[in-house]
Amino acid sequence: MVINMFEKFIAAFFEAELGNLLEYEPIAKYTTLRVGGPARIIAQPKDKCSFVDSIKLARELKMEIKILGKGSNLLASDNLFEGIIFQTDKCLKGVEVEGTIVTVGAGVSDIKLARDMAKLGFSGLEFLSGVPGTIGGAVFMNAGAYLKEISDILLKVEILNEKNEIVWLDKEELGLSYRTSVFQKNQDWIILGAALQLELGDACEILETIKSRKEKRLMSQPIEMPSAGSTFRNPEGYAAWKLIADAGLRGYVIGGAKVSEKHTNFIVNFSGATAQDIVDVMNHVQKTVYEKDGVKMHQEVEFFNWG
C-alpha cells in the first residue's frame, strides 16, 4: 500500500514536470551535521508553483512530508524516513525590494540575503549573516543572534495552510518568542515566504560589521566542522556554553561526536558520527549539567524521524 502511494506520487510528479526526485537518498548529505538515514523520496521542485502542487499531491495521497531548507538546525535519525522531504532552497528563492521592505522566499539563504541587502545599503539583517540556514527556517525557529531575532524585523509570513490555501499571516499571529513560533505546533502550515522591514544605512559600514562578525565566529566557533549550530537554548539567567564548560565537558567524546573545545554549546561531527552518537553526547551533557547545577538544558536543534 505504501509502495503504491510512492509510485503514484512519482508518476504524477514527473508527468506534471514538477522538478527532480531522488529515492533512498541519505539525509546526511543535506544537513549541516552530516548525519541522517535515507529518505524514501527527496523532492526538488523547480519553482514555487511546482512546490505548492507537489505538496498538494503528497497531501492527497496522505503521505508524510518534511520541509527542508539548508538543514542547519536539524538532527535526523539514522533510520529510513518513509515519506517525502521537500527542499526549498532551489524553488522558494525570490527576492523583491520595495522601499525598505524586502519580500523573500522561504528557501533564500540567510547569509546570502544579509550580504546582498548590505550591498544595496540595507541594514537589519546583520545578525543573520552567520546563520547557515534559510529565511523559512529562521522564521520557524525565530532565529536570532547578537541580541536580535527575526521577529524584530518580520512584518508578515506567507504560508500554505492545511486547506492548501496560500495566505499571509501578520507577525502578531505567529506566537513568536525565544526560538519559538506557531509553526512548531502547526506543522501543516508551510512557510512560503516572508516580508521583512529593513532600514537604510551605509553599505560599507554594514559590510564591515558582517565581515567583523565573521572573523569573530572563525575564532570562537567550530565552523570548520559539521554541526547544527548551537545545540542547547540558553536557560533563563544562564549561558548554555558556560554551564557545559563548567561541568568539565569541553571535548567530551562519544563515537564520532564531541563537545567542541572551541565553543562548548556546539556538538560537532568530527569523525563520521552517527545521529545516535550526537544524541548520546547531548543526553550526557543534559544529565551532567543537571547533576552539577540543577539546571535543565533544552535542545535548540530540531529532532526529526526519531519515531
Image: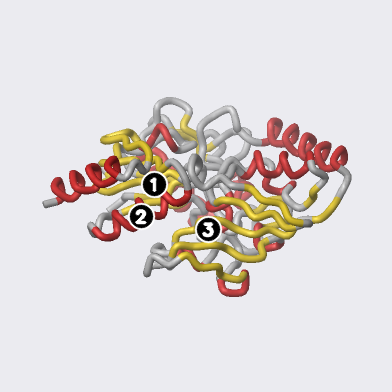
Q: Secondary structure at mark 3?
A: helix
Q: Is residue 218 left or right of residue 13?
A: right
* Residue at 61 percent of width and 54 percent of height: 143
Name of the residue lying farthest toward the left: 1
- What distance separates the C-alpha of mark 1 from that of mark 3? 16 Å
State the residue in front, 288 or 193.
Answer: 193
Q: Is residue 246 left or right of residue 182?
A: right
Residue indicated by mark 1: 86
Q: Of label 2 and label 3, which has the lower sequence position?
A: 2
Residue 121 spot, x, y in % from top left? 82, 45
Residue indicated by mark 2: 55
Residue 203 spot, x, y in % from top left? 85, 41
State the residue in front, 110 or 263.
Answer: 110
* Residue at 88 percent of width and 44 percent of height: 202
Mark 2 neighbour density, 10 Å: few (under 14) some (14–19) many (20 or more): many
Residue 41 spot, x, y in % from top left? 29, 41
* Residue at 82 percent of width and 42 percent of height: 206
Q: Secondary structure at mark 1?
A: strand
